[in-house]
Image: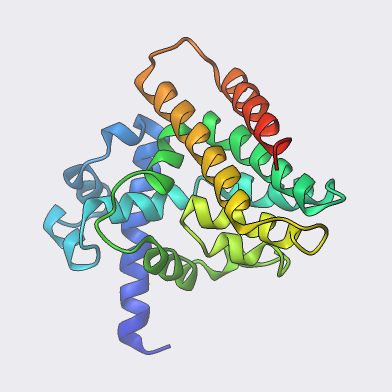
Amino acid sequence: MARREIQIKRMLQYFVDATVAIIEEEGLEQVSARKIGERAGYTSSTIYNYFEELSHLIYFASMRFVKEYLQELPLYLERGKTYEEKYVLSWECFCKHSFAKPQIYHALFIADLGQKPKDMLEHYFSIYSSDLIGFTEEIRPMLYDPDLTSRSRALLELAKQERELSDERITEVNEMSVLIWEGMMTTLLNKRRDADPLEAAEKTMKYIRTIMRTL
């Protein structure tokens, strides 16, 4: 790796580490360019030499909070005997972790980033390649896909190997699952209902299982 690339990687890590620390101590909603700059030891304007928008830096920092989900996902998938079961279990794992950290998962899967999320995710893993160690080929495509609709659909596509399923029905079932999750996530973030993370996960999974019975 060239000296310039090493320097850029180091600067990215400084800002990501500073953002992670602020999220841990004050919450994601308290993150600002000024606070990040102060903690990293640089002016806030320096951030934009390495990130086009603050939301991109927040995206990178948020990825550091999903390690538990990424580590637990393979364990959930192992319990499934069919790809349809694995699909449901993947949602179960995702709901458990996403509703426990709604602001983090909103930043990763719902927030407008103004740039192709796939490019950002590949950039992230180019810096933190160790995050990919130990994942099977079955799971890696999901890790590289920041679009919730396409990454969750991947397992249903594999289910076509086990029984006849139409592309149209797979699309409908998968899109409904994503919309249910997004609706519950919005409800949690807006605090429109007194739902705790566990209750939110259970209710979402109840609806997803109901939809899967129509597949």
The residue drawn where x is 72% and y is 62% is 158
Q: Is residue 34 above or below residue 143?
A: above
Q: Quadrant of residue 89?
A: top right
Q: Toward the viewer: 122 or 1?
A: 122
Q: Quadrant of residue 155?
A: bottom right
Q: Toward the viewer: 210 or 155?
A: 210
How was the colour assigned to the protein in this rendering? rainbow
The residue drawn where x is 53% and y is 36% is 98
Q: Quadrant of residue 131?
A: bottom right
Estimate the x, y position of residue 94 in percent, counting from the top left: 61, 41
Q: How many marks?
A: 0
Q: Toward the viewer: 44 or 153?
A: 153
Q: Quadrant of the N terminus?
A: bottom left
Q: Horizontal placement of 94 versus 52: left or right?
A: right
Estimate the x, y position of residue 73 in percent, counting from the top left: 69, 49
Q: Residue furthest bottom?
A: 2
Q: Quadrant of the C terminus?
A: top right
Q: Residue furthest right?
A: 81
Estimate the x, y position of residue 123 in percent, counting from the top left: 41, 70
The residue drawn where x is 37% and y is 79% is 6
Q: Horizontal placement of 12 versus 41: left or right?
A: right
Q: Is residue 195 above or below residue 134?
A: above
Q: Is residue 105 above or below residue 45?
A: above
